[in-house]
């Protein structure tokens, strides 16, 4: 359970007496206090005091190193964040701003080249600051920071070149430069920054461990010194040892709590000497560690949110089974030969002249309204929405996973779509075409994935729609044969299909009523 920011790490509950507090509060160094108290006792005691002071000096140096390491972590974490933003911008370099405006997408994609160039400029400035702070000759991070500085300048040059191509509207070339030249360097820099943070954190853990051991050794030395002096000055020796042991114990307890992950712990001592300074440094370290931990947790939460968002986006773009295959093997080619699928094409009748009388917002709202209803029907009937093109709508049954009744599903969907179209105002009407047969389905693209289906079955289904009539469902012979037992059809005759020839077609009129059996009779089983 988190403790309050001013939690006392000393579990004994004992408080020092007045004399100990008075000595601890003197504005004198520990060396001066020891020399004043034990003047003339023995050289041994003076030597022991010197050892204790040296131990404290080393502990203070370790604490200062922890503070310095925090700044190093913050620098490399900032590098990681800068590079994450640049990678995101680089992936958008190939996007045409006109497509962004037509899709009413975020303005982020309109200023991609400017943001990428500005981001690399900031990265160069940041690495320059790091070079002055952490990367000077002889410092532990000289090689890494110098490498980051060099790579940042390379990214700056590449970003400017890609930006020039994009400003010249050569989006494909800009995207290629960003993908093949910019992103490998940026991703390598990201990995390097992440590895460096891990390395520094390991160093900090070791420093914290050795610091705790040093504090324990210092405590034992102070107690031994007090016992050695007890014969010469019992009361004064007790007071001075108490003024040292009490804050050391509290500081050690605080460091133990920090090592256990409690970054809200603070230590309060009355000392106005090195131990008081050490206590303040420990508090500062705890506070900065807590801030860093909070930032890391926030970044982890952001990563989880982005992952969930990516999963939702992938689910909207691809069927669940296809998405699972791509995640399992991102480099695989998705191409399936399907023995039997049923295809439905629908088109809004006379939509072009209607759209000429509507504002862009009205057009989008109208299409979104009716196509959202169609999406709900597709989900209800177990169909896979393939795509919408303008005012046309395409769904399929039997893919990506085969089913026993693909033709029944598209027939039910088609009948429900007619009812939905009639429910819209202003005489909305649609043409629908159905066909069933073998097809090939797969995923196209790398930046914008698209699941589609191809083959003569798709072409004939499309012609069934385009050669149909408003408010009617035109189906081919294979569809009629699959549905003849439970659906009604009206013969239309032969229709000349481009590239196919004359095709016998029927109008799907609706479902046939369920057969009525006399009371007590049993319906026949089998054929």
Image (cartoon, rainbow, N blue to C red):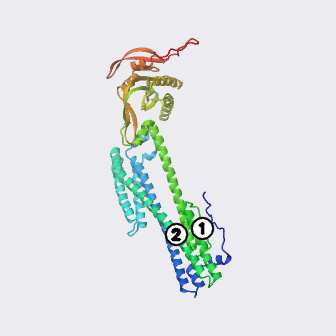
Image quarter (top left, top right, bottom left or bottom right) of the N terminus: bottom right
Q: Which residue is mark 2?
A: 213
Q: Is residue 436 above or below residue 196?
A: above
In the image, 257: left or right of 110?
right
Q: Residue furthest bottom?
A: 40
Residue 317, percent across and down? 44, 37
The residue that label 1 is drawn on is: 267
Q: Nearer the viewer, residue 405 or 419?
A: 405
* Disc 2 and disc 1 in contact, CB within 8 angstroms: no
Task: Relative to 412, say whether 325 is above or below.
Answer: below
State the residue at coordinates (34%, 53%).
158
Given residues 364 and 141, the one toward you in this image is 141
Query: First in sequence: mark 2 or mark 1?
Result: 2
Do we see residue 29 in this rendering? Answer: no
Residue 330 position in % (x across, y down):
39, 43
Q: Vertical placement of 421 versus 192: above or below?
A: above
Residue 215 locus on image (x, y percent): 54, 71
Q: Say which element carries label 1.
A: loop
526 sits left or right of 3 in the view: left
């Amino acid at each position: 359970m988190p403790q309050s920011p001013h939690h006392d790490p000393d579990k004994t509950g004992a408080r020092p007496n007045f004399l100990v507090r008075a000595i601890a509060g003197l504005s004198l160094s520990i060396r001066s206090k020891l020399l004043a108290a034990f003047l003339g006792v023995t050289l041994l005691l003076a030597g022991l005091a010197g050892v204790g002071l040296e131990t404290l000096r080393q502990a203070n140096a370790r604490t200062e190193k922890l503070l310095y390491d925090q700044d190093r972590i913050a620098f490399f974490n900032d590098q990681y964040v800068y590079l994450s933003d640049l990678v995101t911008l680089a992936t958008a370099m190939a996007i045409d701003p006109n497509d962004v405006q037509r899709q009413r997408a975020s303005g982020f994609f309109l200023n991609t080249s400017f943001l990428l160039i500005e981001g690399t400029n900031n990265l160069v400035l940041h690495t320059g600051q790091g070079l002055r702070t952490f990367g000077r000759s002889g410092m532990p991070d000289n090689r890494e920071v110098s490498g980051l500085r060099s790579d940042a300048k390379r990214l700056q040059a590449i970003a400017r070149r890609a930006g020039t191509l994009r400003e010249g509207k050569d989006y494909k070339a800009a995207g290629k430069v960003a993908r093949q030249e910019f992103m490998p360097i940026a991703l390598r820099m990201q990995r390097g920054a992440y590895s460096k943070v891990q390395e520094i954190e390991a160093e900090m853990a070791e420093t914290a461990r050795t610091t705790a051991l040093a504090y324990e050794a210092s405590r034992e030395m102070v107690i031994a010194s007090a016992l050695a002096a007890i014969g010469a000055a019992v009361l004064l020796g007790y007071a001075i040892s108490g003024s040292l042991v009490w804050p050391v114990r509290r500081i050690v307890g605080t460091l133990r709590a920090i090592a256990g992950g409690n970054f809200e712990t603070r230590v309060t001592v009355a000392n106005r000497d090195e131990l008081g300074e050490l206590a303040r440094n420990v508090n500062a370290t705890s506070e900065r560690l807590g801030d860093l931990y909070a930032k890391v947790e926030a970044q982890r939460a952001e990563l989880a949110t982005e992952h969930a968002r990516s999963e939702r986006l992938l689910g909207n773009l691809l069927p669940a089974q296809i998405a699972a295959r791509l995640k399992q093997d991102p480099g695989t080619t998705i191409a399936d030969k399907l023995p039997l699928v049923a295809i439905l094409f629908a088109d809004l009748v006379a939509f072009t002249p209607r759209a000429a009388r509507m504002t862009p917002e009205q057009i989008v709202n109208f299409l979104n309204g009716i196509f959202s209803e169609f999406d709900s029907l597709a989900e209800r009937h177990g169909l896979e929405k393939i795509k919408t093109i303008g005012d046309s709508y395409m769904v399929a049954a039997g893919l990506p996973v085969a089913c026993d009744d693909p033709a029944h599903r598209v027939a039910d969907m088609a009948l429900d779509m007619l009812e939905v179209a009639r429910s819209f105002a202003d005489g909305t009407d649609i043409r629908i075409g159905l066909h069933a047969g073998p097809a090939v389905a797969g995923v196209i693209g790398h930046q914008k994935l698209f699941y589609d289906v191809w083959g003569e079955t798709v072409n004939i289904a499309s012609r069934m729609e385009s050669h149909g009539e408003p408010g009617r469902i035109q189906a081919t012979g294979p569809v009629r044969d699959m549905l003849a037992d439970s659906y009604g059809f009206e013969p239309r005759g032969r229709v000349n299909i481009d590239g196919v020839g004359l095709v016998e077609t029927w109008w799907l009129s609706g479902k046939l009523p369920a057969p009525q059996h006399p009371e007590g009779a049993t319906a026949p089983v089998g054929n």
